Image: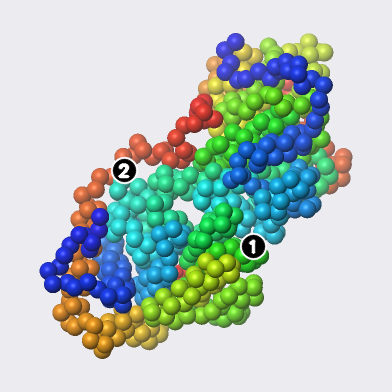
Amino acid sequence: MSPHRTRTDGHAPALRHRGELLYGMLRIRRFEERCVELYSASVIRGFVHLYIGEEAVAVGVNQALTEDDAVVATYREHGHALARGIPAEAVMAEMYGKASGCSRGRGGSMHMFDASRRFYGGSAIVGGGLPLAAGLALADRMRGQPRVTCCFFGDGAFAEGEFHETANLAALWRLPLLLVCENNLYAMGTALKREHAQTDLALRAASYGMASWPVDGMDVLAVEHAARQAAESIRAGAGPHFLELRTYRYRAHSMYDPDRYRTKEEIAEWKARDPIDALARQLRDDGEVDDEALAALERRAANEVAGAVRAAERAPEEPADELLRFVTSPVTPTRAAR
Amino acid sequence: MTTTATTAKKPRASSATATTTYREAMRQAMSEAMRADERVFLMGEDVGRYGGAFGVSLGMLEEFGPERIRDTPLSESAFTGAGIGAALAGMRPIVEIMTVNFSLLALDQILNNAATLLHMSGGQLPVPLVIRMTTGAGRQLAAQHSHSLEGWYAHIPGIRVLAPATIEDARHMLAPALADPDPVIIFEHGSLYNLSGPSAEDAGPADLTSAAVRREGRDISLITYGGCLPKALDAAEQLAEAGISAEVLDLRTLRPLHQDAITATVARTHRAVVVDEAWRTGSLAAEISARIMENAFYELDAPVERVCSAEVPIPYAHHMEQAALPQVEDIVAAVHRAVD
Ligand SMILES: Cc1ncc(C[n+]2csc(CCOP(=O)(O)OP(=O)(O)O)c2C)c(N)n1
Ligand SMILES: [Mg+2]
């Protein structure tokens, strides 16, 4: 159980919807800032891709999804995993490589899974989650289940054949698939205009015969609105929808990236549109929160992250003699002779 | 007998008169599976109206309709990945890929998703998917339709690889493959589709864990699979006339290999020739040879021989293609090298 649900912070009143969105983004941001420290301390290793700056996308889109829907994410998926409700302890423990991690230490930062929440990863092959998401949607379509499969991917993935194959297949079969393209203007160091001849991605997606439009990915309320509209239409049988979320990552692509391909000015311009700051300002202007309430939110986020780190530190490691477990399913009659 | 391999010939009086083909046997297996389980469906390029590139699914569209006999666009990666997703969501898809050469466009999905998800998710996501594809040469289809890449797939942990080489296996390997909670790839050698023989209707579900001794012998073991099985049996027949008794072991399952059957046949005959239509370098034949060295070295009276395809893209012209492929004479010659 996550601490933010058990903890009653004295005078913290029940948050209204926008306040929940604000907290949803804030906890992801604070969680990842802690990841940076842990990475610098060599506690977390491997590839770690931060979502800082893009939180409005995962949090806003998630508002449109129910527990029965499915999510397929990328390697930059801490935010997707947390927004989906995977406890912060399980996400943090996975980065620690612990047995209590949401993939039992076999996945790490890029491969978070939670079958019980229909969270199907956590894929580090750019574009590789798209066909799989189409299949999840196909199963729902064949069984007449009014569920949505939501697949997150980047502007870089839009150049992969797997995107175009999947877009065509999904439109052809009218699959209940929500394609969420996180256009953060870069694929590693390659700027959008250096990787796409036509940079209007929503326009290109529309050519497959699906509803498709761009959304301000720095405005969580705009994201929520668009996602609700799309999901509703998908549930009504209108087939796949494509949302191009215009957003930006503040940090380098990964911990290894010296970030030489963009300017400080550009980063500063996007930070000035920060989705967390913007919503906090709005709530304050509307008199819904004051300094005290914002400080309480910060304390709550700090507590949640600290609790996740404590739990991860205390958790046992997956024993190395479990190495071969789960390569195949437990022995069945067809497997007796191995 | 020390072998744990199944022995091939069981008399089946009731079906002795009915004959069928390998292609029909595979179709019957699919139709039976689809009648028995609503979750099963077939998807691939031209499986529906066309009836399958090799005619395997001919007529199934009429019985099961276009939802379950699902024609796909030319998008190997997307429809293979869709099979994975549908399997994750509780369906039991059979994905047909026209040939193993085309499967390379879906290799990302097969290796990075199907074979990997269960382990990478810490045991949460088994992928009960069956992929069928044609493999092999012999029909003058040249270098982009003729290769034998079963060994590449057999390299991958997390998937089961089957090579039915008889009508009985074509008929009865599919049901246990669909019951397997993990991904299974079934390789159908193109030269086997027209194989005809007694119907195997009442043989019951095949065992996917063991190799089968297709012919017993004392002097040497011919270890093979798939499209090379008929050649190995022909070679054994010729060798018998020359007074050499060759045992023929059909591997049937290429991953996981049935090590005990390989060890047991070598322990009986003390000599082995591995016959594999793939290229020799880095092949399944190399793997089997290494396993014999590791597990039965002191049983050997001669070095293990390998009969494989020439290391060349398979050419078009009939005489060139045949020169590239393992032939009965090559197997016989290898046996003589090992025995003499
Ligand atoms: C198939 C594949 N090619 C290359 C890479 C290396 N790679 C990892 S992330 C990335 C950029 C992806 O950009 P985008 O899709 O825009 O997502 P973002 O990282 O911006 O969120 C690249 C090239 C990979 N992981 N997979
Ligand atoms: Mg990007």
What count of labels does the image hold? Answer: 2
Q: Is residue A152 above or below residue B173?
A: below
Amino acid type at mark 1: Trp
Check the image and tell me how it is coloured: rainbow
Residue pointed to by mark 2:
A318
Of pointers 2 and 1, the one earlier in the residue sequence: 1
Callout 2–callout 1 Cβ contact below 8 Å: no
At 82% from the left edge and 35% from the top edge, which residue is drawn? B194
Q: Residue at x 68, y 24 (%)?
A: B203
The location of residue A258, given as percent across then percent down, is 38, 72
Which corner quadrant of the image does residue A158 belong to? bottom right
* Chain under disc 2: A
Which residue appears farthest toward the left when viewing the image? A10
Say which residue appears at 26% left-offset and 89% top-offset.
A285
- Mark 2 packing: few (<14 Cα in 10 Å), some, or many (20+)? some
Per the image, label 2 sits on a secondary structure element best described as loop
User: Where in the figure is residue B4, as x and y percent of width and height?
Assistant: 57, 18
Task: Find the distance from the CA under tag 2 to the CA under tag 1.
Answer: 42 Å
User: In which quadrant is the N terminus of chain A drawn?
Assistant: bottom left
Amino acid found under the numbered disc labelled 2: Glu
Viewer-closest of A189 and A69: A69
Tell me residue A178's x, y (percent). Answer: 52, 67
Identify the residue under disc 1: A173
Of labels 2 and 1, the one closer to you: 1
Q: Is residue A200 above or below residue B123?
A: below
Secondary structure type for disc 1 = loop
From the top left corner, tell me how far across and down residue A301 is, in percent.
23, 68
Q: Which mark is residue B251?
A: none
Subunit ID for the residue under disc 1: A
Q: Quadrant of residue A222?
A: bottom left
